[in-house]
Image (cartoon, grey):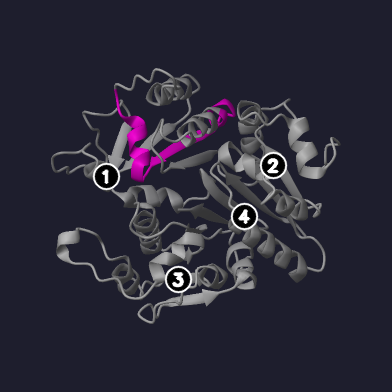
Amino acid sequence: MTKSKIFFLFFNNLSKERLEWLNAILNQLNIQQKSPQYEISFFLGGESLYSLLDKRTSHLWSKMLNNSQIKLYPDHNELRILGLPSDLMLEEFSGSKELSPNINLSSSSSFWDLIIENLMKEQFDSRIGLLQNDGPYMHRTSVYTVRLLNAAINRNLNTEFYGYLDGVHIGHKGQKPSEFENISQSLLNIKHKANDKNLEFSMYSCSRCGIARGYIRSPQTQDFYLSDDTIPHFNFCNLNKIIEQFEKQHPILSSNSAIVLFEPQKDDLRPELTIFITNSPYASEWTFGGISFAVASAMHKIHTQIIFIENGVYGLIGEHQIGEKEKIFNLQDIIEATADLENLKFFAHAPSLEKRNIILSKKLKNISLIYNEDLTTIVLKNNRKCLYHKRIIFF
């Protein structure tokens, strides 16, 4: 029997809480299967690397890596930048300078090439997509996205960029950073490289996000259109046009995301999508953005789950009372209004609620309480025939 494969990609801080529930669901997966029928790879870059050294979290990695089916791929170049040389990291992490067979610190291939190589061993279309939610410079994830796009083009893959939320800023023209890599110029360089290799490199950004940020100032009638304020080829479009790409079978990654692969089948179903809502409701656009993305996905007949977890459960307290003057979408009203969508399900992570002394609002009758064993089944297991893969994105 072909093993299931799970790829996790993390660039932002990995909290103790997240590693605890990840540990729990992977352990539950191990218990539910008599023999290992899966392989799990963690690719860590940026701030997530600190979790390997931090005493609050390193023991959780040690527990996970006791499982021979779990492999860890830290970005060795980022370790150097962050002052975490591999020998120091290993000594603090495992108490020994001996390299664990579960940890890959080889510098023979770049971290970005390893991600692409491992993913594209599978039965995917010769295409890959990158969803960018952060703006450039304030967030180094824009650099990581550029690295991944380059690695994909180098491997002769057709490549797509999707700008969402502050990710639309990545294409602003006239960028002239004094101390950082020029992100918009890097995108243009990737476009030129793709053209030279007769490959497709498409850039799509959400028009709603673009209008909110001042890139589009007049009504548009075409499906795809440019802004006077962005670089060439940086197309704005309705979010539905981006979601259309999620109906297809190519892998799509984001700065904190995962892909779950099952045994290949004929007549593959559209990949499922799980959105983890991990931020509080109104201090940023993350929660609204994640729910909007999930609703659009469900309307495209993609089986979609929204899971409120970690600080995301703060959105489920009591009854939100928001007047017209606040100019804020009432997130609880959105949850209620989408209760009858056939392909959309809402869940709340009970351990996250308990940690924060929160009781799920009685108003939100369409949200199901789940525990870690339920999370394992919903997220990591194949519950439908002919499903090849699931996508997971953290908002």
Q: Would residue 105 be visible to someone looking at this image?
A: no
Q: Badge 4 local density, few (<14 within 10 Å), some, or many (20+)?
A: some
Image side of residue 335 versus residue 380, left or right: left
Residue 78 left/right relative to 90: left
Is residue 156 part of the magenta span, yes or no? Answer: yes
Q: Which residue is mark 3?
A: 345
Cα gap from disc 2 to disc 3, whole angstroms: 37 Å
Query: Nearer the viewer's eye, disc 2 or disc 3?
Result: 2
Q: Position of residue 356 (x, y in %)?
A: 50, 68
Q: Residue at x 58, y 49 (%)?
A: 14
User: 284 or 173, which is in the foreground?
Assistant: 284
- Sequence-earlier tag: 2 or 1: 2
Real-space Cα distance between discs 2 and 4?
12 Å
Q: Reply above or below: 390 against 46.
A: below
> What amino acid is found at the position of numbered circle 1 in the picture?
Ser
Residue type marked 2: Leu
Where residue 80 sits: x, y (%)? Answer: 65, 26
Which residue in the structure is indicated by mark 4? 16
Q: Nearer the viewer, residue 135 or 30?
A: 135
Tag 1 residue:
207
Mark sitting on residue 53: 2
Q: CA distance from mark 4 to mark 3?
A: 27 Å
Task: Name which of mark 2 and mark 3 comes first in the sequence.
Answer: 2
Magenta residues span 151-173
Q: Amino acid at mark 3?
A: Lys
Element on which disc 1 rests: helix
